[in-house]
Amino acid sequence: RLGLPNFIQEIFTGTPEPAMNITAFCGGLPTIFEGVGTDQIDECQWSFGDGFSATTPNAEHTYPIPPPGTTQDYFVTLRITNRCGLDVLLSETITISGPPPNPTFVPPGQQPTVCNGPLTLQALPANDPTFTYLWSTGETTFSVQVDRQQIIGVTITNAAGCTSFGDLLIADNRPVVE
């Protein structure tokens, strides 16, 4: 039998450019760091901007939680080197967000009862246009109306994807009529 031997063909697609990708920007939760080198022999050195570092191409780091409604900037660097002379320093300033303020539902002094008809609950303290709301009833507005005794909750999400949650027992203090 004649013919060509079996072989594996690899098509060269070029050398990738060094890069870094950073995702997840909520304090208290892992931020994901991905380093892209030019070759398998590349070594990576991350500096997370808060005194911590890592030596792997892909790393996770958890930043402290900023106070609710605030942010904290960090200057992140990635140095990619190899024994063939590659030495690249990449940098980026990232912003770590704190969670939105926890909801308080009703203004100070108001009781969460449905004695005198429906009660309007709000995801207080602020109706921020960058926030999204998800109530346990499925509604996605800043405020909801309730007309019966129940436990109701709301998750508030800010633009960075950080969340806060609160729930509240709505009482029906009307006397029982027999």
Image: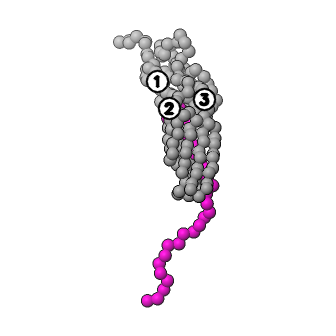
Q: Residue at x 54, y 34 (%)?
A: 51
Mark drawn on residue 71: 3
- Residue 67 shows up from this direction: yes
- Compare residues 169 and 177 and report the one nearer the observer: 169
State the image coordinates of residue 31 (x, y, percent, origin top left): 53, 39
Say whether residue 71 is left or right of residue 171.
Answer: right
Label 3 vs 1, first from the N-terminus: 3
State the image coordinates of residue 86 (x, y, percent, origin top left): 61, 54
Mark drawn on residue 28: 2
Give the amino acid type for the residue marked by disc 3 in the picture: Thr
| Start-end of magenta stretch | 1-29
The residue carrying pointer 2 sits among few (fewer than 14), some (14 to 19) or many (20 or more) residues within 10 Å by Cα, namely some
- Compare residues 66 and 144 and report the one nearer the observer: 66
Please identify, in this view, whether the residue under mark 3 or under mark 1 is nearer the observer: 3
Give the amino acid type for the residue marked by disc 1 in the picture: Asp
State the image coordinates of residue 102 (x, y, percent, origin top left): 52, 23
Contact between marks 1 and 2 (CB within 8 A): the answer is no
- Compare residues 123 and 89 and report the one nearer the observer: 89
Q: Residue furthest bottom?
A: 1
Residue identified by numbered label 1? 167
